[in-house]
Image (spheres, grey):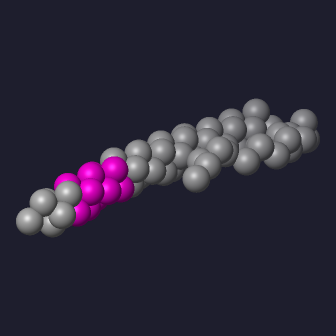
Amino acid sequence: MSSRRPSLPPMPDMTHLSEDERKIIEDVLRRQREEEDKEQEMIRQMQLEYETYKLTVDKVKEEAQKSNHGR
């Protein structure tokens, strides 16, 4: 599982905008990046939790099989 972020598109040409308009757009783009970063961190954490859960299940299964063979 890969949680690598796709490459970001180039910044739009904002030379025709006023300073206030540029600031608004830049703020929106910044918030978008922050949200995407949060999302990527959540995905990474979920992958880690899944792997930990899988290892635990495999270990319990292996121990159960060992105890069944010992009977």
Secondary structure mostly seen in magenta is helix
Q: Residue at x 77, y 43 (%)?
A: 7
In the rendered image, residue 71, in percent from the top left (x then y), is placed at 8, 65
Give x and y (percent) for residue 16: 91, 41
Q: From the viewer's perspective, tell me whether residue 46 is left or right of residue 23.
A: left
Identify which residue, 69 or 11, lies in the foreground: 69
Q: Is residue 53 visible?
A: no
Asked if residue 64 lies in the magenta stretch, the reply is yes
Task: Tell me the residue at 34%/50% (across/down).
Answer: 55
Task: Out of 3 and 20, give the one closest to the viewer.
Answer: 3
Displayed quadrant of residue 69: bottom left
- Is 58 situated above or below 3? below
What residue span does the magenta drawing correspond to?
Answer: 54-65
Position of residue 12 in the picture relative to residue 35 (left or right): right
Q: Is residue 22 magenta?
A: no
Q: Is any part of residue 61 visible from this angle?
A: yes
Point out residue 39 in the picture as x, y percentages from the top left corner: 50, 50
Q: Quadrant of residue 48?
A: top left
Is residue 17 left or right of 51 when viewed as pictured? right
Nearest the eye: 65 or 71 = 71
The image shows residue 67 at horizontal and vertical percentages of 13, 60
Name above or below for residue 46 compared with residue 33.
Answer: below
